[in-house]
């Protein structure tokens, strides 16, 4: 039965991947991509990588899918004007994608023997940071600098999206996310689901210290609740000139950097935590990062300003 489940998953993933590439309608391709991400999260569950499965479902399928759906909506006017990439550009993009896929396949299918791993060493020293989840220990303690840089990249991504704002609209709000076709089901979900979603998001962040969960998973759930309310027209996209909005964007990385400098005075190294205070510091950093990630993901989906600022 276990083998049968794996074979069915492989077949469904291949079908979703082929459909994503071959379907002609962009919206259908994005939906197929979201389905592919959800199926991949099931694969990670089958491999007992629960943290990776949650991240794939929340970020890979959920947040990325929303960004792509938003991009499809913004491309409709361009498509109507016929200003789309020509066959040469499309062929070049396809060839580059195939080369990248072949390179990744070669790396995955021909690993070094013995396979290098620091898992045993990480598990042996996890008690020093007081965490029960080895994934969180790796991301926030052993490879904390990499994690910090990833969060800074998210801030830069928001700045890049805002930089696309036309001069006349600078400082204003993104365009409405409300669908042209009103949906009673969407309105009901936007009114009922957010309180539960907020609790789930906070729980994922808190639970990530010792069990599967964490900053990205919890932050993505919080962002999804915010986006759901904006899509149902229960909340307006915020103006990008708001100072409190910008403070929320940088709040998490700023707390992370502050904890890093505090480590110099407490333990002698940047991003080094004293054993007695390691877990509280990491949980505080994760909570701050989750809030920033929620705001950043929501702003990335909303896009650049499309309305002039209100006077």
Image: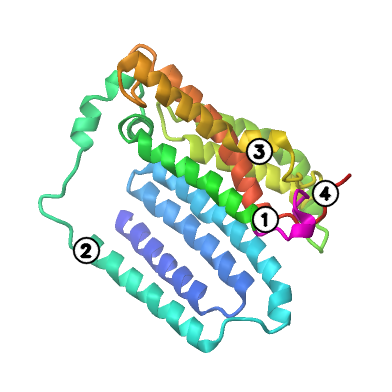
Disc number at residue 223?
Answer: none
Give the distance between the C-alpha atoms of the residues marked 1 and 3, in whole angstroms.
15 Å
Counting residues from the start of the chain, the first of labels 1 and 2 encountered is 2
Q: Secondary structure at mark 3?
A: helix
Residue at image mark 3: 246
Boundaries of the magenta span: 164-174
Left or right: residue 85 compared with residue 137: right
Name the spot of residue 16 as percent of width and height, x first: 48, 69
Which is the main secondary structure of the residues drawn in magenta?
loop
Toward the viewer: 310 or 150? 310
Give the distance between the C-alpha atoms of the residues marked 2 and 3, in whole angstroms.
44 Å
Residue at image mark 4: 309
| Mark toward the viewer: 2 or 4 | 4
| Residue 240, placed above or below residue 109 | above
- For the point 35% across and 26% down, which residue is it? 270
Give the distance between the C-alpha atoms of the residues marked 3 and 4, in whole angstroms.
16 Å
Disc number at residue 303?
Answer: 1
Location of residue 80 (image quadrant): bottom right
Disc number at residue 109?
Answer: 2
Give the distance between the C-alpha atoms of the residues marked 2 and 4, in whole angstroms.
53 Å
């Amino acid at each position: 039965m276990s083998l049968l489940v794996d074979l069915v998953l492989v077949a469904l993933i291949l079908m979703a991947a082929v459909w994503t590439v071959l379907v002609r309608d962009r919206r259908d391709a994005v939906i197929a991509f979201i389905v592919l991400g959800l199926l991949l999260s099931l694969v990670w569950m089958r491999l007992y990588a629960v943290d990776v499965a949650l991240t794939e479902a929340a970020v890979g399928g959920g947040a990325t899918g929303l960004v792509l759906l938003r991009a499809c909506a913004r491309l409709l006017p361009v498509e109507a004007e016929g200003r789309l990439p020509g066959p040469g550009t499309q062929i070049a993009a396809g060839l580059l994608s195939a080369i990248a896929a072949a390179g990744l396949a070669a790396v995955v299918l021909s690993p070094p023997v013995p396979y290098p791993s620091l898992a045993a060493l990480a598990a042996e020293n996890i008690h020093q940071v007081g965490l029960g989840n080895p994934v969180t220990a790796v991301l926030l303690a052993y490879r904390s600098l990499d994690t910090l840089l990833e969060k800074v990249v998210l801030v830069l991504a928001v700045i890049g999206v805002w930089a696309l704002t036309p001069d006349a609209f600078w400082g204003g709000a993104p365009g409405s996310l409300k669908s042209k076709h009103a949906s009673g089901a969407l309105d009901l979900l936007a009114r009922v689901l957010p309180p539960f979603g907020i609790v789930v998001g906070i729980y994922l962040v808190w639970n990530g210290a010792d069990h599967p969960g964490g900053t990205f998973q919890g932050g993505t759930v919080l962002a999804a609740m915010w986006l759901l309310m904006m899509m149902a027209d229960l909340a307006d996209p915020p103006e990008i000139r708001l100072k409190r909005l910008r403070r929320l964007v940088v709040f998490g990385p700023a707390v992370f950097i502050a904890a890093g400098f505090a480590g110099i005075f407490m333990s002698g190294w940047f991003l080094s935590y004293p054993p007695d205070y390691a877990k509280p510091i990491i949980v505080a950093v994760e909570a701050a990062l989750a809030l920033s990630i929620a705001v950043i993901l929501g702003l990335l989906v909303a896009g650049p300003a499309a309305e002039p600022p209100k006077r």
